[in-house]
Image: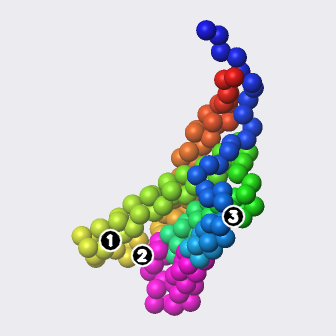
Amino acid sequence: MEDKYQGNVSDFIIQGLCNTPECQLPLFILFLIIYLFIITGNLIIFFSIMFNSNLHTPMYKFLQNLSIIDISSTSNVLPALLNFIISQENTISFFWCLTQLYLYMSLGCSEYILLTAMSYDRYVAICDPLHYINRMSEKHCAWLIIIITVLGLLALLAMLFLYLNYHIVIPT
């Protein structure tokens, strides 16, 4: 039996969302409220740490960076989901899907690396308190945050190039 192919896939169809008009608006409002709560909560954390000089310690700087990562990953996915729900357009291009996947996974990697740095901070504070000031100075903390961001973006670069060369075909 011989397979015949239509050609390369350029769009994906998003399924699983409510297609009836009765649930479209409540679902949109629910996800919009969730999105606004996430953004508001993380902005409160970010600005509380920024404006309170007592919170300018490495752990709070890491928490501030964690809230930025959370805002970024949520803003990567939920606005597109809200657009799919309200417009009833359920297709996404391969390039946009790949971009969202890369950003979401890179931000997830950055979050895991940041949580590791936060655990290292607590380890040094508990097990070696006399050297804590030297090991976790503002300079070291800033370098750790820069390294975390770069590692998170570079960790999945190979996956991105593999997916760019991957051709999805549909059998007829």
Question: Which quarter of the figure has residue 33?
Answer: bottom right
Residues under numbered marks 2 and 1 in contact, where contact means CB atoms less than 8 Å apart: yes
Mark with earlier residue (3, 2): 3
- Amino acid at circle 3: Pro
* Residue 87 image point, x, y percent: 75, 61
| Residue that mark 1 sits on | 122
Amino acid at the residue labelled 1: Arg
Residues rendered magenta in the picture: 36-63
| 27, 108: nearer the viewer | 27
Where residue 151 appears, x then y in whole percent?
A: 53, 52
Colouring chosen for the image of the structure: rainbow
Residue 59's tag is 2
Nearest to viewer (mark 3 / mark 2): 3
Task: Say few, some or many: other residues with alpha carbon within 10 Å of mark 3 (under 14 / 14 to 19 / 20 or more).
Answer: few
Image x and y of residue 60, in percent? 45, 78
Q: Is residue 37 magenta?
A: yes
Q: Establish if 66 lies above or below 154.
A: below
Report which residue position mark 3 lands on.
Answer: 21
Residue 138 in view of the camera: no
Closer-to-camera residue (9/165):
9
